Image (tube, coloured by chain):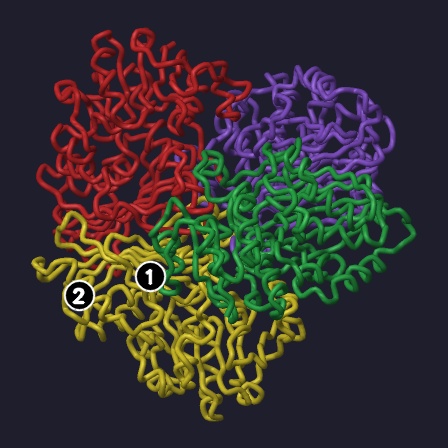
Chain colours: A red, B purple, C green, D yellow
């Protein structure tokens, strides 16, 4: 039984880790921290846990956390990087759901996150935790940088096209939309029910922090620079990310059937990527609460632009589920353990 | 491994049975019927099942169904009663999620469902499948009438008061509200998103079919006649039932603490009833996707009226989850098997 | 043209006053105050006003406000009572949408609002602004205490029954539900989209501040004490209040038709009360954005309990629309001026 | 007072025409038709109209309709084209909200609507009713083809770029999203609350009927052929269309300020187009119930792709409001008459 610690358990990725781990056969949460809620039972904050979990928030303390086999950081950025070096030194493995170790260039990180990275040397050892790209590295990793929610949905949709050099990497366009839980559990006017219900808008059009992360990883897949216009939008729903991706075919003579076949082959061994039949349109509700990413391909009017659609649950495959998928791989467990619950539909 | 058949699998209680049974360790769905969708894969109708279930809808046929250990009817009323006698004769056990066997008086049934009951003799053998009232009978039952969604929420909230004769049984008032999934998966104008979103209304005020069912069962708990005014409402949400129940204390000198204690004792062995601390207000989202019923007690202004609040997921504890709870009991399995998933929150 | 000032215009009742007054033929908003947003254009905070309103928030200042013919207070409680005496002295008429002048007993007010009332003498001169009860008093009022949202929906549903002594005033039960905009525009975790969407709960069961207000006014209608159990609930929608009211008939021989007739007669001259045909169930969306209150009567199973349903838009008839209705009456304008827009449906 | 007839008044554009015309100073609805609802009061079908409108549905009859000054067709396609020739001959002016007269090439129309156009000669006389492009033609038109909802949002966002030849017309990409009311008031499983709530998906990716309409009109603005990839999506909300449009600048040296200036100039006289300040992101709720289109420009990372965002209410500027705007222009009334109501927010 793996002993699991969670730092920063009062947000939505925290409670989602608790939900998913509550039925995991080989892992047990032994510690969950929150400075603000110290001493409070997790089921007081999240009544959905009543009767299932007998854990209280404690103040984060590296020494105690170091007794865990693995520690998840479900914190805002700038928390993990201050604790990770010491925990690694103690032999604890780390899965960071925040942005601290996602961008390998410390200067680029600083530009987007407006502060200095405190441990660029450790940063260099982090493995980007997208199992569909980095399976073997993850198995051996000490420190996982869990991908962002948008980056997960976008990469799974575009990497087969870029790896196979099927499309122009310099003109990628992604219009993506997220449920509100992506904004976290913060008391802000902008996140009120009354401000978001029955409405839709773009945000971060000029530059969202997930852009450099996506470009970095797509460039690795493309083995060369990529240019991406990325527009996130906010949906009047709690969970779900949907990405609509546009790419121009380099050779318009390649039929869509062939692209479909390449996607199916690419993901044949990926338990959490579902390449749907041609003509499908993935709905976010078909992945709500599940770790699945559903993908569908289109080529409108048989013109030169390929449209890839992908859907994930931002809190599961886009965060806590993917984190557990990484944990399973790191500790030699079956990749799908604890992650086989189906989507809640309707 | 129990062989499970499902009749009428194209509705929401059908897909919910599939979701819950997909991770059940001792039961496997071997057959699911639908005349209209014969030959169609269940995952074509419900893409949430893609990759997890390799089953096709077949035309309902009593001979084939009789090869199952247990058959669930997830049908509108007036289907089960036409097939159940033959299946029972073949030794198959039945869990009927419809209304056909809930009301023990065949004439009363006819009055509310506007047709003759075709097998009143079988009706007399049905066990009302509320485990918190009928645990032992369920263990030995051949035919279970699974309670309606409102009746489940209301009974769990009121039976301790009535069993203990704490309140006036002749003046019960229940104001309850349901998510839209309670109306089923039917193409009706009234159920459109555009007709229900951002709105709330009462319905069936003059007489809802769950009223005689509730009164029948509450009378058994009270060991005497009860009078109930029951007003259902429709919520702009998919899942969840919430009941607000008003009852007048027979002896106002009994303090609320004592009532709370009686509730806690009454449900001490019920794994799916959560009596929350005094002052709580159960939210439907804390049971979304789970088989739990959460209950809280209030006595406003310390006057003579007790207010009981209860919340369930209408598709789980109010239908498919409770059906599986019954199956577990009928076949000697742990009561909670396959039902331990936590609510999806947020 | 009436010169209108608004104190506290950054909340939802503030922007609703602006929306409604923007098309009012005889009133013009000349001043709107907010300490926090001083200098900011109203259309910066509320882009729905872009192109229609050229007003900036200013710091509240009694001298400037006193140049208005009428000042609306769209503030939390405990603001109006500190400014009203001076404004009244200057001859400005006041319509207070907050709770400061609703409860005539200053001690009772203090008990529920946890502070001392600063001007009990002025309190004694306030007129409770429910036009369907106090039409003539409102015409001559200097200071209007605009009713709360729940109190409006409940009183309109119950006063005909109490005025006519048709029901037992000591056993009234009201189960009411409100859209989230009733909680105002405050940055609180509890009001986040992620905390409220797809969920329903009761709140304030032990005692909501609208209870003493409702009991006070119902007692006036009943000409004697009343006893009310009042349970508010929170709906996953922005606008709308729905009240389900239960009352026991004193003389069960009175047929429902007759009660219906009494309601129709009682509200024959009330332009904003719609007594719907027997058997109707008012939906909140049929009054969304409008000043109408729709009411329907039921007598389930022909037993002794009458069920009255009422629906209003909490921000219109429950706040800003009713405030303007009061203004119209105070200044001799047609009661419906500026309030004839129909509900937005769907 | 204009005498107005409405054909097909039982859908959402029909009731929206009634709502908007109920406060129009110079137009009165004298006739509304529906075969299915003949004899039924409009306020029975739409209780929001109770007390405001005393009209019953009648069977459509060209002779009676010909007594109107103007007839709106709020019907599915293939109704108007069968009645319009006779009505025009009788001197009645027509505003068709359906697709029958939008596409000028009758063969192209047939290809997308799968039937023959019955009056290609009349088609040639129709004026495309986008006032921001065809103001003068509309003033003199006998027959208006009211633009589709997506086409309105997309054209208003792209025509300044194309008219000024600022972008490559062959590589336009539009990712747009609509509220569910765009699907009409039809009893289909796909439109149920339970199928759409808390979910998002693309649809019609391979080819939506609005594509040829948009390409036809954009080509006129560009004075040359355009190539558009258009992806519609379905939002879990009732009203609102949002379009996110991507275009490549022909001369990257042109600064965004200059483009912004061109947009502001282009729409200086358009009362229903709001060019928001640079950096804005229009929310659909800021136009809910109003005839406004809000537009904002972005140039992410200062690269070569311009992103234009636009938001309208699909039932107002995307249908019934724009139809009334056309009527005002056709009859020499102020363009904004009856359309000055502000958006309902929140």
In primary-sequence order, the first of circles 1 and 2 is: 2
Residue at (14% x, 45% y) in the render: A227
| Residue that extends furthest to the bottom in the rendered view of this protein | D90
Chain ID for label 1? D
Residue B43, by quadrant, is top left
Residue A340, placed above or below residue D338: above
B279 left or right of A264 in image: right
Looking at this view, is D84 or D110 the one in front? D84
Residue A79 lies, with reference to residue D335, above or below; the image says: above
Where in the figure is residue C254, as x and y percent of width and height? 89, 54
- Whether residue B119 is visible: no
Please state the horizontal and vertical placement of residue D175, each as a whole percent of the image.
29, 55
Residue B180: image tag = none
Per the image, the residue denoted by label 1 is D294
- Residue B83 seen anywhere in this rendered image of the structure: yes
Q: Which quadrant of the structure image shows residue C313?
A: bottom right
In front of the other: C153 or D81 = C153
Q: Position of residue A264 (x, y in %)?
A: 27, 39
The residue mark sitting in front, 1 or 2, is: 1
**Which residue is disc 2 drawn over?**
D169
């Amino acid at each position: 039984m793996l002993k699991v610690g969670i730092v920063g358990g009062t947000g939505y990725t925290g409670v989602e880790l608790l939900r998913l781990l509550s039925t995991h056969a080989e892992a047990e949460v032994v510690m969950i921290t929150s400075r603000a809620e110290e001493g409070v039972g997790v089921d007081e904050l999240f009544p959905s846990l009543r009767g299932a979990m007998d854990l209280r928030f404690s103040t984060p303390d590296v020494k105690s956390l170091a007794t865990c086999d693995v520690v998840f950081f479900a914190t805002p950025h700038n928390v993990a990087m201050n604790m990770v070096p010491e925990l690694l030194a103690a032999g604890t493995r780390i899965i960071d759901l925040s942005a601290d170790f996602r961008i390998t260039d410390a200067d680029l990180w600083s530009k987007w996150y407006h502060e200095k990275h405190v441990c660029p040397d450790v940063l260099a050892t982090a493995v980007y935790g997208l199992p569909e790209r980095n399976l073997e590295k993850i198995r051996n990793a000490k420190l996982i940088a869990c991908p962002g929610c948008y980056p997960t949905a976008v990469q799974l949709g575009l990497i087969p096209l870029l790896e196979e050099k099927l499309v122009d990497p310099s003109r990628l366009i992604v219009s993506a939309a997220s449920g509100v839980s992506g904004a976290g559990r913060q008391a802000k006017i902008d996140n009120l029910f009354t401000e978001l219900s029955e409405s839709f808008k773009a945000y971060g059009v000029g530059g969202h922090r997930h852009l450099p992360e996506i470009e970095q990883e797509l460039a690795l897949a493309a083995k060369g620079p990529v240019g991406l216009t990325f527009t996130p939008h906010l949906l009047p729903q709690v969970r779900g990310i949907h990405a609509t991706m546009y790419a121009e075919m380099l050779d318009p003579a390649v039929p869509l059937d062939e692209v479909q076949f390449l996607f199916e082959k690419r993901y044949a061994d990926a338990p959490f990527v579902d390449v749907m039949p041609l003509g499908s349109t993935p709905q976010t509700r078909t992945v709500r609460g599940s770790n699945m990413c559903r993908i569908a391909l289109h080529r409108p009017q048989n013109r030169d632009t390929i449209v890839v659609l992908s859907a994930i649950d931002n809190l599961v495959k886009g965060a806590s589920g993917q984190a557990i998928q990484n944990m399973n791989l790191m500790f030699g467990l079956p990749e799908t353990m604890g992650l086989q619950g189906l989507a809640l539909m309707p």
